[in-house]
Image (cartoon, rainbow, N blue to C red):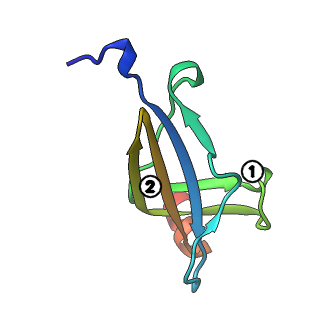
Amino acid sequence: PLLPNACTVKYEIDYTFLAKGASKAEEIGTTADLVLGDEAGFGLIPNIGDYIDIPRSRMGERENYRGKVVRRLFRHVLGYCYIRIVVEEVDDATWQQQFS
């Protein structure tokens, strides 16, 4: 069923990065890395098991943040869906095996 226009949902996506051996994930960029819905348009939300590569131009100390999506949390609050995506670092051999 279609939702009425008054029930639009906006999505805010926040990426975090879990480096090898780290016990806590670090923020990548700002708290709302990507906003979707209404005027903001649409985008794809990576699924668990997907590989992603975020260049350093998005802020941070690393050359890039690349790895595999291991967890996603969806939190719904008053017309917003806040999505936290945890990306776990993969070694170069795994990355090369996937994308060479």
Q: Which residue is mark 1?
A: 58
Q: Secondary structure at mark 1?
A: helix
Q: Foreground residue, 86 or 80?
A: 80
- Placement of 47 over or under 61, stated as above or below: above
Quadrant including the C terminus: bottom right
- Residue lying at the far left in this picture: please name it: 1
Comes first in the chain, label 2 or label 1: 2
Looking at the picture, how far across and down is residue 27, in whole percent? Answer: 65, 63
Q: Position of residue 54 (x, y in %)?
A: 66, 53
Give percent across and percent down for residue 5.
38, 13
Task: Please state which of residues 46 and 23 is positioned toward the viewer in this rendering.
Answer: 23
Return the residue found at the far front.
78
The structure residue drawn at horizontal position 62% and vertical position 46%, both measured from the top left corner, is 32
Q: Amino acid at mark 2?
A: Asp
Residue ranking furthest to the bottom: 21
**75 left or right of 17 in image:** left
Q: Quadrant of residue 72?
A: bottom left
> For residue 8, which quarter of the picture?
top left
Q: Residues within 10 Å of mark 2 (few under 14, many from 20)?
A: few
Camera-side mark, 2 or 1: 1
Q: Is residue 36 left or right of residue 49?
A: right
Query: In the structure shown, which secondary structural element does the residue marked by tag 2 occupy?
Result: loop
Q: Camera-side residue: 18 or 94? A: 18
Tell me the tag on residue 50.
Answer: 2
Q: Residue at x 67, y 59 (%)?
A: 28
User: Residue placed at 55% from the left, 83% from the top?
Assistant: 23
